[in-house]
Image (spheres, helix red, strand yellow):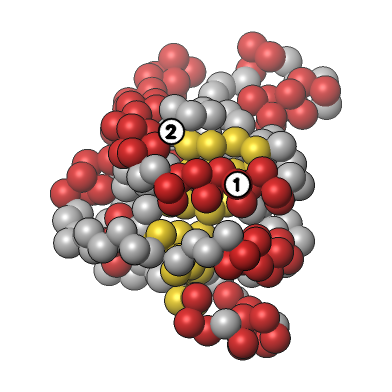
Amino acid sequence: YLSNTIKKDLLELGIDEEKLVYFPNCVDIDKFQKTNVKKNVNRKFLNLITVARFAEKKKGFDLVQNICANLIKNNINFKWKIIGENTHFLHQNNFFKNNKNLFDILDNIENIDEEYFPHTNLIKHYKSADLYINLSRIESFGVTYIESLASKVPIISFSSKGSDEIVKNEINGILVNQGDIVNFVDQICQINKNRNIIDNMKSNCLDSIEKFDLDVNINRLVNIYKKLN
């Protein structure tokens, strides 16, 4: 099972707990550490990033307009990069059309020429950001969470199944009650005023996802198979 949420569901279906093995999605942390990017030190803009396929309700894209309107109201200078499959559909929304200067919308970055996901180019996008914005209402396991944290980019997210197993409030990110847009925006505003909040959380990002390292879990999987023989 990928997460405690899924484990709970399996147990409720009557699966024998002794037959369950925790095996999460993983990232090659070493690949992230070896990927360098020249970060823009201009702190006049808060660089936000979201990596998600276009699923308007599940991924929370319907909340973007409200969040942006409140950020603008609070005089926050920001750029929001959104990357994912079918994100070009966002261009059909009038808000995105009328505020092109706020967004950089990119299609999914495929990994066709490298051994491990995500592609180096996607890692560079992560690393160029200050803060990862997660608006998903529910996730079984947020792969983009650990990709962001491997890039040393803290996360702000609504507290929900999936996110609260990875994002630890005020340690590697900020968790906000589901649907509380006012507090979500306020947290971003506080971070914009005091970038040390980001700097302090960055040091915890890698430590918080060591258990999701690819090499660690490959060894665990091999040992699991050996025990079956």
Query: Helix, strand or loop at disc 2?
Result: loop
Q: Total marks drawn?
A: 2
Q: Is residue 95 left or right of residue 156?
A: right
As displayed, is residue 122 above or below residue 138? below
Q: Find disc 1 in the rendering and name its residue.
A: 186
Which quadrant: the C terminus? top left
Rendered residue at 45%/66% (across/down):
77
Residue situated in front as seen by the camera: 223 or 2: 2
Determine the image quadrant of residue 48. bottom left
Label 2 is placed on what type of residue? Answer: Asn
Identify whether 40 is placed above or below 91: above
Please indicate, yes or no, whether residue 191 appears anywhere in the rendered image. Answer: yes
Residue in view at x 32 percent, y 43 percent: 152
Q: Work out whether mark 2 precedes mark 1 in sequence or the reverse, and give the earlier one.
A: 2
Q: Alpha carbon of mark 2 to alpha carbon of mark 1: how far?
A: 18 Å
Q: Is residue 3 visible?
A: no
Q: Amino acid at mark 1?
A: Asp
Question: Which residue does the numbered mark 2 point to in the structure image?
Answer: 172
Q: Is residue 57 above or below residue 9?
A: below
Q: Where residue 84 appears, x then y in whole percent?
A: 52, 68
Q: Position of residue 118 (x, y in %)?
A: 36, 57
Residue farthest to the top, as pictured: 18
Q: In this image, 44 relative to 55: left or right?
A: left
